[in-house]
Image: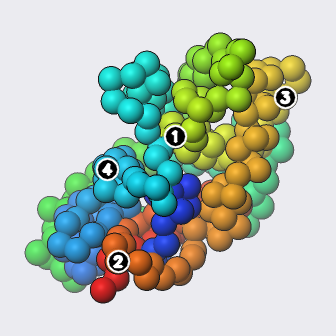
Amino acid sequence: MPRVLFALHEKCLNFKSSIVDLSKSDQYQPWYLRLNSRGEVPTLRDGVKIIPHSGQILDYLEDNFSDENTPPLMPAKETKEMQCVKKMRDLLVMVPIPLITFGCLYYPNLTTDMKISYCERKKRLSFMSNISNNLDQLMKKYPEFKKVYEEKKQCFQTFLSEYQNENKVRTALDNLDLTLDIIEQELASHTGDKSSWWLCWKNFAIPDIILALILQRLNELGLYNRYLLEGKRLHLYQYFKKVQDRDAYKKTFQEGFRCKVHYNKKRGVIAIGVVMVVVGVVVFGALAYRRMK
């Protein structure tokens, strides 16, 4: 997910990156599977350390890159703010964004102002439907990774059946209403000296990154009006406007998750697998960041 890229910009970290083409199943090539045995993105490498999941990467960056030059994305432990961060983070990571994304691409009638062209939608859906064939070919070419390919094939077949089930997609969209109601209530509770707070804290935190990316995706899928306009969730509406003014947000989406930047400080990281986004659809790329000597 682009969460890692967003976090790197929020923490003002420079980094070295390279693109992995997911449309060509680069994440299932032997070189990548040797870094991440499940062929999942993202992956972070810091020296000899390998961190394979966006959530773990965010925690690693917070634990190892938080000082006077790198703003923290988490409040102090054992505080009410930290309790809120944990609660909201757990809530937001449960939002099934892949199901909502591909479900809306498959059923554009569920949206009102899709920002993604017909050709782009067709390309993404075609890619998803061809994954099983691609994995079969890889299985023949690299039999030593057969177990991984078989597991991935089953996962994609299950996902294919889910996003092609309109009822499941509608249920996910309805459940998102309930989640955003909770978010709205939390934002509305910030009054007085807390009126300038973000979701849980005076500082922009990890749940804010996750929420910002969800809202951006909803906008691109043509779901913005359903969840934020027409007098709905005014606090969340104002919140997203404020998020869009942040430098890290602008850098993340201006780069389109295809950046190549070099980290020249004494300590750096390599992360492989921040998923690229083009006009809001999960597409086929990844980033790599590494420690520079």
Q: Residues within 10 Å of mark 3 (few under 14, many from 20)?
A: few
| Residue 190 in view, yes or no | yes
Identify the residue at horizontal 55%, vertical 55% (top origin): 10
Which callout, 3 or 1, points to the residue nearer the camera?
1
Q: Please determine whether, in this image, residue 167 is positioned above or below residue 138.
A: above
**287 horizontally vs 194: left or right:** left
**205 horizontally vs 158: left or right:** right
* Residue placed furthest toward the front: 68
Residue indicated by mark 1:
205
**203 horizontally vs 72: left or right:** right
Q: Mark 4 near mark 2, Cβ–Cβ under 8 Å?
A: no
Percent coordinates x, y for residue 84 in the rendering: 46, 22
- How far apart are labels 4 and 3 at the CA level? 38 Å
The quarter of the picture where residue 142 lies is bottom left
* Residue placed furthest toward the right: 230
The quarter of the picture where residue 42 lies is bottom left
Residue indicated by mark 3:
229
Residue 266 numbered tag: 2
- How far apart are labels 4 and 1 at the CA level? 14 Å
- How far apart are labels 2 and 1 at the CA level? 25 Å
Q: Residues within 10 Å of mark 4 (few under 14, many from 20)?
A: few
Which amino acid does the dot numbered 4 rest on? Asp
Q: Tag 3's secondary structure?
A: loop
Identify the residue at horizontal 14%, vertical 76% (top origin): 143
Which amino acid does the dot numbered 2 rest on? Lys
Which amino acid does the dot numbered 1 rest on? Ala
Q: Earlier in the sequence, mark 2 or mark 1?
A: 1
